[in-house]
Amino acid sequence: MQIVVIGGTGLIGAKLVRRLVGHGHTAIAASPSSGVDTLTGDGLAQALTGAEVVVDVSNAPSFEDRAVLEFFRTSTANILAAAAAAGVGHLVALSVVGTERLAASGYFRAKIAQEELIRQGGLPYSIVRATQFFEFVASIADAATMAGAVRLAPAPVQPIAADDVVAALGVTAAAAPVMGIVEVAGPEQFRLDEFVRRHLARRGDPRPVVADPQARYFGARLDERTLLPGPDALLARTRFEDWQALTGAAAGR
């Protein structure tokens, strides 16, 4: 099967390309560095020639509200049009568990717009929603740091390793379109502040982590269900402690 991975040189994309090739597929990494720009459309038609499946794991270069919305609207529309013209039979897109509950955040409003375009785009599709990546725990801490302290809501999360997200994407790409959403999550629940506190302690980071119910998560308020998957979610096996031991204390971004 010939599969084009949009964003194929990033954290998830590069891992996915390697996994697909290892499973006998022809996987093509499409990104600006390979001459494919989904915002302008440059190189997109050529990249999708002969493709049976397209997997979009790209992300916006800027998370500013207007810029991120423009990215996902324009990029997704261009991918849909080019995929339809190329006769692609399946579009797989990576999104985030709880997206529809996070509309107070500009980033998640953009993801909502992306998902809606895909649903209405006329192409057979599967949307894979993942929980927070272990690899992004340091980014979450940095975004929540104010005056030297990390302030996070004590909301439940069920984070997942990037490798497990990649595995779910690979299985979904090789299967028939689900015409809906597949949720994937890690095997354990934590409070968001606890999740970050554990990581910073392992790294020897001295920043205190404060449990603040009013703290916003990338602009959105959290409750007990906001970041958790539904009962039918696929649960991965990699535990946070095992991921930390495998990747080392400095992992994350």
Image (spheres, rainbow, N blue to C red):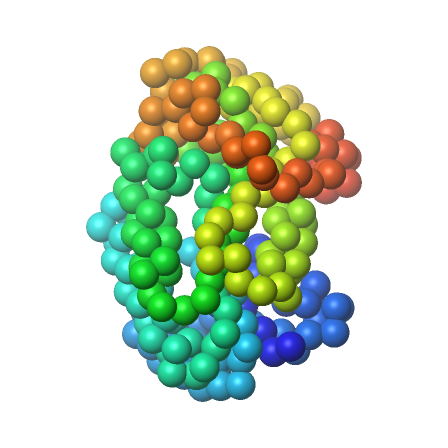
Up-down: is 35 above or below 238?
A: below
State the residue in front, 102 or 106.
102
Q: Is residue 60 left or right of residue 91?
A: left
Going by the image, does 107 lie left or right of 192? left
- For the N terminus, give its image quadrant: bottom right
Of 223 and 148, nearer the camera is: 223
Along the viewing direction, whichever of 253 and 174 lies nearer the viewer:
174
Q: Residue 173, located in which quarter of the rendered image?
A: bottom right
Q: Residue at x 46, y 62 (%)?
A: 125
Location of residue 31 in the rendering, given as x and y in whole percent from the top left corner: 47, 70
Is 124 on the left or on the right of 115, as rendered? Answer: right
173 vs 213: above or below: below
Place of residue 76 in the rendered image (x, y in percent of width and height, measured from the top left) = 35, 64
Residue at the spot 44% in from the left edge and 72% down from the top edge: 32
Tell me, yes or no, if residue 15 can be seen here. no
Residue 241 horizontal side relative to residue 152, left or right = right
From the top left corner, tell me how far across and down residue 74 is, in percent. Answer: 28, 65
Quadrant for residue 251, please give it.
top right
The number of discs equals 0
Q: Residue visible at 62% across and 64% down?
A: 175
Looking at the rendered image, the quarter that the C terminus falls into is top right
Q: Position of residue 23 (x, y in %)?
A: 75, 68
Q: Is residue 239 above or below residue 36?
A: above
Q: Quadrant of residue 37?
A: bottom left
Residue at (41% x, 33% y) in the render:
143
Look at the image and tell me whether residue 74 can be seen.
yes
